[in-house]
Image (cartoon, helix red, strand yellow):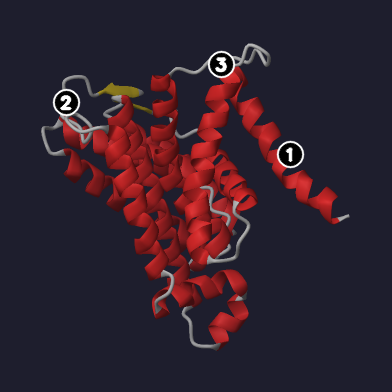
Amino acid sequence: MMSLNEIIMSLELGLIYGIVALGIFLTFRVIDFPDLTCDGSFVLGSAASSMIMKAGYSSFLGLSIAILAGSLAGLTTGVLNTRLRIKDLLAGILVAFMLYSVNLHIMQGMPNITLIGTQTLFTNISPLFILSFLCFLLWPVFGYLFKTDFGLALRSLGQNKKLAENTGVNVKNMTLIGLMLSNGLIALGGALFTQHQGFSDIGSGIGTVIIGLASVMIGERLLPQKSLWIQLLSCLLGSIIYRLFITFALHSDILGLETQDLNLMTGVMLIGIMIIPRRHSC
């Protein structure tokens, strides 16, 4: 059985990865760009934030630098795609691949960094409170952003790029901005994860895109409305449900699963989510 502390920890991780899910929703759903930079951006935010705090600077500066670094990673992917005409999937894979070396350089060649004795965002205040506040601040911010002329132009990319271009939208620039926003959010998630867990690890970003997609898809099944506000909320809710499910599965005596089964569980869950609608529609 899950203890109260384990449930709270799952909620906190769900909120952190909910921010990551918002970033993935932005690329995969809003601008229709299958961006695989995510795994590298998550670690980039984690590494940048941890090194800033280890140098004695504030956790807020660490978060800000993480967002900036993630945005630059997204910009790089966008430039490869829009300016150098490299396919979207390959551009993301290349940047994520190169970020492995960049992240190791940021971490001064160390595969992991501990933040023991370092003042973090969660040192004096409940992580659940801070993360809840942050998530429900981002929700209306992006909800209103997507209702503006800029947001409508950004959303038009995911509907019909040719039509958007014909109506005067600069598709290339909007793609760059969308990727910067997305990877900035994902890097923020990485920075929050590091401050929450108390360490930064070079392998912590593995599977970020799958976890984010799982969260987005779970949310879409739970709240299938087309309202953008509901879609954004469903990303956060889907991430929390995903984390609670994983925690429950690992503590279930009936299932008898262990931590090494985590990727298998996530993969099976995603396959199930993708298959169910098809069967229903036949």
Image height check: is 173 above or below 89? Answer: below
Local secondary structure at mark 3: helix
Residue at left offset 44%, top offset 26%:
7
Q: Amino acid at mark 3?
A: His
Q: Looking at the image, which is closer to me, 93 or 115?
A: 115
* Count of residue discs: 3
| Cα–Cα span, label 1 and label 3 | 21 Å
Q: Is residue 257 left or right of residue 208?
A: right
Nearer the camera: disc 2 or disc 1:
1
Residue 178's spot in the image, x, y percent? Answer: 44, 63
Q: Residues within 10 Å of mark 1 (few under 14, many from 20)?
A: few
Q: Residues within 10 Å of mark 3 (few under 14, many from 20)?
A: some
Q: Looking at the image, which is closer to me, 94 or 139?
A: 139
Residue 83's spot in the image, x, y percent? Answer: 48, 68
Image height check: is 56 above or below 140? Answer: above
Residue at left offset 30%, top offset 47%:
133
Q: Amino acid at mark 1?
A: Gly
Q: Disc 1 or 3, which lies upstream in sequence?
A: 3
| Cα–Cα span, label 2 and label 1 | 42 Å
Residue at left offset 31%, top offset 30%:
196
Res. 79 mark: none
Q: Label 3 belongs to which residue?
A: 251
Q: Label 2 belongs to which residue?
A: 118
Q: Disc 2 or 1, which lies upstream in sequence?
A: 2
Q: Is residue 199 left or right of residue 231?
A: left
Residue at left offset 41%, top offset 40%:
15
Q: Label 1 belongs to which residue?
A: 272
Q: Quadrant of the C terminus?
A: bottom right
